[in-house]
Amino acid sequence: MIIDCHSHIFEFPGHISRAFADEANARSRGKPIGLHVPPERHWQGMQNVDKAIVFGMRAFHSGIISPNEYIADYVKMHPEKLIGFAAVDPMQDDVHETLEHAIEGLKLRGVKLGPIYQNIHPLDERMMPVYEFCERRNLPILIHQGTTFPQNAPLKFSLPILLEDIAMKHPRLKMIIAHMGHPWIDETIVLIRKQPNFFADISALHYRPWQFYNALILAKEYGVLHKLLFGSDFPFTTPDATMDSLRNFNHIAEGTNLPKLANEEIEMLIHSPTLDLLELN
Ligand SMILES: [Zn+2]
């Protein structure tokens, strides 16, 4: 089974400010991304995966405000394939009320956070109710902990190592560090190696081939390939392009003595047992 653990839907205009969209397009390696990602576009993009975790984002500071109802309405159309995560902005939202409604009322099954977009330290006291809520109810958190393009998104809140205290305090909390915490991939690897319930996704890394190569080889050397989850970051790239890059992973090392991944390791990454690891079955 192939599970995309990291995919987005957004309405634009509506959920994303013009300023954010302009900056995203200006930094998008040549071609505009097209941030209008309604359910139909997402559904089309997920044709070649068996399941997909889908979410929006709530980050008032960055001009991204998705209603959790929008995710829930889409998931209800394809409950056999889609798993929806809630979004909450601890700077603005009433955390308990927002999550209670999203989980109990809307039947969403995990939570998306992005401290760098939300302009909040991951250990800020306003974040604590999110971790407590999710640990108590066994809800995984997918956290964007790593860099991102907007000028006003502070890097100082985005270091993966900042999450260590959360793991210490909430040992049963399941957390997925998006994009292996790029560029602090080594921090992410040593953190997920220590913390049994911490994982990382490989989404949106393959289009920096040298970084992608080093990330997965380092993960292999530390023995954490089994803690990496397959994901795309759709619409920024696609599950198909991510699978292609994985299956062509060793090309960069061909004709050299550089280390490679075995085919079984590559297929294990594509077929990561995400639902079992996150207890979402
Ligand atoms: Zn993403």
Image (cartoon, grey):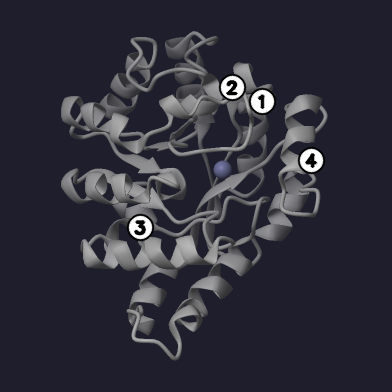
**Which residue was labeled with disc 3?**
228
Answer with mark 2 or mark 3, whichever residue precedes in sequence.
2
Query: Do callouts 1 and 2 mark residues in contact (Cβ within 8 Å)?
Result: yes
Q: Residue furthest front?
A: 256
Query: Do callouts 3 and 1 mark residues in contact (Cβ within 8 Å)?
Result: no
Secondary structure category for the residue under label 3: strand
Residue 215 position, x and y percent, is 38, 60
The answer to which of 151 and 91 lies nearer the viewer is: 151
**Which residue was labeled with disc 1?**
64
Q: CA distance from mark 3 to mark 4?
A: 29 Å
Secondary structure category for the residue under label 1: strand
State whether label 1 is within 8 Å of ligand 1.
Answer: no
Which amino acid, by three-letter code, is at mark 1?
Ile
Residue positioned 47% across, 76% down in the render: 249
Residue 16 position, x and y percent, is 73, 28
The quarter in which the N terminus is drawn is bottom left
Q: Is residue 107 above or below residue 242?
A: above
